[in-house]
Image: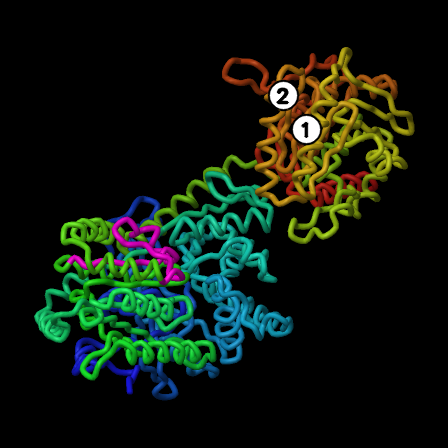
Amino acid sequence: MYNSNSSNIPGLGELLKTSGRVILPSEHEREEVISENSLVEKYLNGAPAATALNANHEKQEGGRLHRQRLMVVANRLPVSAVREGEDSWSLEISPGGLVSALSGVNDIEARWIGWAGVNVPDDIGQKSLTKALAEKKCIPVFLDEELVHQYYNGFCNNILWPLFHYLGFPQEDRTSTRSFQSQFSAYRKANQMFADVVKAHYEEGDVVWCHDYHLMFLPKYLKDFNSKMKVGWFLHTSFPSSEIHRTLPSRSELLRSVLAADLVGFHTYEFARNFVDSCTHILGLKATTEGLRDEGRITRVAVFPIGIDPDRFTRTLEDPKVQEHITELREKFAGRKVILGVDRLDMIKGIPQKILAFEKFLEENPNWRDKVILLQIAVPSRTDVPEYQKLTSQVHEIVGRINGRFGSLTSVPIHHLDRSVGFQALCALYAVSDVALITSLRDGMNLVCYEFVACQNAKKGVLILSEFAGAAQSIGAGAILVNPWNSSEVSNSIFQALNMSWEEREKRQKLNFAYVRTHTSQKWANAFVSELNDTVVEAQLKTRQVLPLVPNREPVQRYLQANNRLLILGFNATLTEPVDEPERRSDQNKEMELKLHPGLKEPLTALCNEPNTTIVVLSGSDRAALGENFGELNLWLAAENGMFLRPANGEWKPMMPEHLNMEWLKSVKDVFEFFTERTPRSHFELRETSIVWNYKYSDAKFGRLQARDMLHHLWTGPISKAAVDVIQGSHSVEVRAVGVTKGAAIDRILREIVQSKSMTSPIDYVLCVGHLLGKDEDVYTFFEPDLPTDISGNARWPCPEKIQSNVLDLKENYYSCSVGTTRTNARYLLQSSDEVVSFLKELASASSD
């Protein structure tokens, strides 16, 4: 009977165990099965760094130059600890390509923060382990057994990992809300514990590099602690499409937490695109060439495909002992072609699909049955999980059936090993194999193909690679790409590889090796750290250009000293209550109703009753909306961008320019109706001087595409010769007659105020606050003593002739504040309507004292 736990080639199992240390798998995210001890030790012992990458990688302290410190935060430390006594520990170096990659980061003094893989409940043990790990430049995070079970085994590996690999939720968790919530709470708690350790060891100027799906909350927790901290986050697995990610109950919290990082990295363009799509569809954010924009802040999203260290493989092949192993293997495989598979025994690796495709090849090509073998190394993974136990049984059953069908007393076509092998033995296998067959169903990268290529300069073996492996987007030019679900395609690819000419194999190997040689793991790490530094520097330069916040006391003091004050306030997003996040909006009709901020009524009423204060609410909304919200207050209302004015306790009257042409309105309305019908959850508002189409509640990405299509329709049709302005907002398109702007209406409004109130002294204090579109920012510049000009000397904003100088005498008593918009002509910034209300409360409180 076939024993799937041992090789049927005499002595092969023993041979594979003799060379090098036996490597055991540890975590899902590990893409490399084997790692070389010397490189790990080089990193852990702090080997001398290379030349400085750039000037940004150094900092000045006390007159001395220091290398920049890199804090690598991952779920597991590169060291496993075993307790030998009350204060004694044995430390064993763990494998991992990440450790090898970080050993070559230029001019970086690295520290590693993570869980040591052991429960240490007592203080003495924690102190002694911390001291022991410090010698290896490692800092432990202490997690108890229950937290590890809920956080790591639960939320990370039971929820996130299957979802990110398109496997969906485990069956037992689909209807268990309590189980999900407890695991999610543990996930947040663990992330906070990692953040606390980082904060305890952080020094100004440090770079913090967070790794993988275990720590998606960490960037937010770190930025909440110090907004200037340099934080990067990298995902080592695949990232699913937005349709998959949106099924996660905590989808928005996780995305926003990751976006707190300065730089977010992925292995492939596909994963980066899926992440950006999730942020645009689920969060309603806007993607730009710079990255994702969230409330004025930009997070850069970039692709950094990881590699290997090819030199360690070529050096190993030159070892005399490895050459002996290669000779022995060639003798054992004499007369037969070798197809090699090296995978974790995992659902995403497609091992059953690989074996079944090989069976189909044997069925269709009987002349190859005694000339080819499939050597499959399946490294055990999560052996205590029922799904993995079932997968193991399934693979063993398929292998036994195929070997029974096509094997003989002396040989079998499939040799299946349920164990990992030593590094030297693996290199020897790579070198003697004719074909590497990788059939991942979904993989973050899969570096086995890189390792195979690095060992194939002599034999020029052929790489058959799944198109669903991340490496397919990097090394696919020289490989045969296959769909692992299509057994006929994989079978045909095996036939093509086995019959490929030497010239074509040589050409493909040259392409593959050139990529592996130049895109190393060290280059990957250097590129990410360098990009993170550059991203932070660029953000700092932009921050210096950002508007300052309103000074604390100065506007209030000058308000009290002024004799005749004018307050011009916007309405939407200025005086209204804060709008919920897009993903929380469940009732569109309810959200469309603009409601005043709950804290506004009291301070606004007090200011309206000030005898020397005039308040004007200037909005693009129609008369009905303003009258409904402010009808009882003693203030002036200017609707439809100032085209209709209602004095305090007065009646509405038009303020439109003469000869205003509105003949275009009907044809534009037809276009807006057409796009409203084809864009779910969009709507349009018809006003007397303009028309606005709003897609705020539609799918963000689809809405933007429809808006772009709408603009094309408008400019080539109904407004091609009309005297109109088209204003594109963040989620809207507005068409209005030329000359209909808030700034153009200010002059007429001021004249009405002066005449109505019979003012004898000039206005000596103006506060202008609003969330304005670019077309309406002439409101801010109207009161500036000198209008900003463009390079031709013309005024930047089309303003009417200034009102007579005896009406305004502002000097320094002018404050223009933009609400939530950083690219503006205003002097100051207020972050939200909450801050607007707080500011008005200060004015009202100071006036009553």
The one of 601 and 675 positioned closer to us in this rendering? 675
In the image, is residue 672 part of the stretch drawn in magenta?
no
Q: Name the residue under label 2.
A: 717
Position of residue 799 in the picture relative to residue 358 (left or right): right
Q: How crowded is mark 2: few (under 14 residues within 10 Å), some or many (20 or more)?
A: some
Q: Residue at x 37, y 80 (%)?
A: 397
- Tag 2–tag 1 contact (CB < 8 Å): yes
**Under tag 2, what secondary structure?**
loop
* Residue 789: quarter of image: top right
The type of colouring in the image is rainbow
Q: Residue 671 carries which label?
A: 1
Residue 708: where, in percent of width, then height?
58, 32
Marks 2 and 1, how far apart in space?
Answer: 9 Å
Position of residue 649 in the picture relative to residue 617 (left or right): right
In the image, is residue 463 part of the stretch drawn in magenta?
yes
The amino acid beneath tag 1 is: Val
**Under tag 1, what secondary structure?**
helix
Magenta-tinted stretch: 460-487
